[in-house]
Amino acid sequence: MTETRSLVALLPRPVRTLPADLAAVFALVVLTNVAALAPVLRETSLRVPLGLAFVLFVPGYAFIAALFPEAGDEPTADPPSDVDGGEEPTEGTDGGPLPVGSFLDDRSGIDGIERVALSFGLSIAVTPLIGLVLNFTPWGIRLVPIMLAVSAFTVGATVVAAVRRRELPEDERFRVPYRAWYAAGRAELLEPDTRADAALNVVLVLSLLLAVGTVGYAVAVPPDGEQFSAVYILTEDDDGELTADNYPTEFTQGESQELVLGVDNHEHRTVDYTVVLVEQRVSVEDNETTVEEQRELDRFETQLDHNESWHHPHEVEPTMTGENVRLVWLLYPGGDVPEEPSTETTEYHAHLWVNVTEE
């Protein structure tokens, strides 16, 4: 315990005096970034609950903490009374009932329930706005830019909230009543007034454990859905955009043309891929295609995570001449390539018919 206190004493004073709720915001930002970006942890289900809290609650909470650093009165608190006369004001200046809004206007800050509700609402509003701004930047809407942008917004709002709270008198600062919640919960669970309350407490605890276990299992073991890979060929248009059109079909022997190889991973796991590019001279009789000759032109390797794509520009230079030479890209998930690769040894392949004239 003494060693822990000595380590805490080494931290700068602003860090040591940071309120517990704002320190939890910082910790959650760091944990979410690690769970979403670390090579090993990003494959686990830990990023799901952290990501949901990070997107749906934390940015709004930090923003609300910066706007309202002071503690708020509970909305159910009794209205102010006349101390001298001992009577509560019941009439307005015109003789009618005093408006309820006059009580609310005297309240400073917001209470805990309002703070939580506004945190959810502002998070749902702020996160899409950040994504909209990123959409008009060179980085676009991708995981790393979104994580960094939301993290920067949250950390900046948290710093402002910490500074504004420190400027207030200590008795006016907002604090999360952890100890009061713990004492009330402990008394309710361990010191029930009647046996019926004790039985209800047991049922409540079991229900919470069942709900947490069900949600945890659903997060840890999500349905895989359909598992497949894909291979395709693209070209680059005049604007530099990739398109599945305008393929080169006329080649000259000894000259190459550029194509873009595309591979998609939807296997719900990380996969090593090998793509074999072959050229074939084929004959077609009675709707049956027979490969008369085949040569391997190139071979490519890559590793992709689930839902990741790979676009690889490469030069294609056929060696066979004649009409209807077939170029075939054979995709092998797992990297195991047979001695004689063909369309019969893999279910994933793409082809292009070309005419090759002699040099």
Image (cartoon, rainbow, N blue to C red):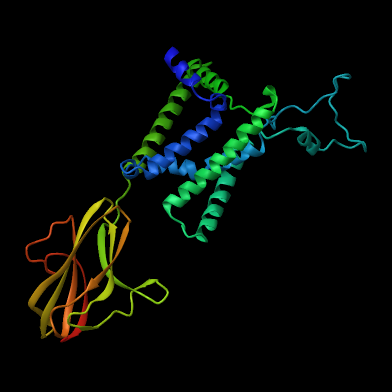
Depicted 52 relative to depicted 327: above or below: above
Nearest the viewer among 195 and 137 is 137
Which x, y percent locates residue 312? 28, 65
State how many labels appear: 0
> In the depicted view, which residue is nearer to us: 172 or 317?
317
The x and y percentages for residue 182 are 52, 21
Residue that appears at 86% across and 36% down:
97
Residue at image location 85% in from the left, 20% down from the top: 83
In the rendered image, the quadrant that contains the N terminus is top left
Q: Is residue 33 above or below residue 202?
A: below
In front of the other: 126 or 14: 14
Image position of 122 (left or right of 44): right
Q: Position of residue 24 (x, y in %)?
A: 50, 32
Dividing the picture into quarters, in which one does residue 333 lie?
A: bottom left
Residue 71 shows in the view: no
137 left or right, relative to 306: right
Question: Could you tell me which residue is drawn at 57 percent across and 37 percent down?
Answer: 158
Residue 73 vertical position relative to residue 299 in the rendered view, above or below? above
Pinpoint residue 21: horizontal percent, then vertical percent.
55, 30
Left or right of residue 261: residue 90: right
Instruction: Report the residue at 54% width, 39% height from top.
Output: 155
Q: Residue furthest right?
A: 94
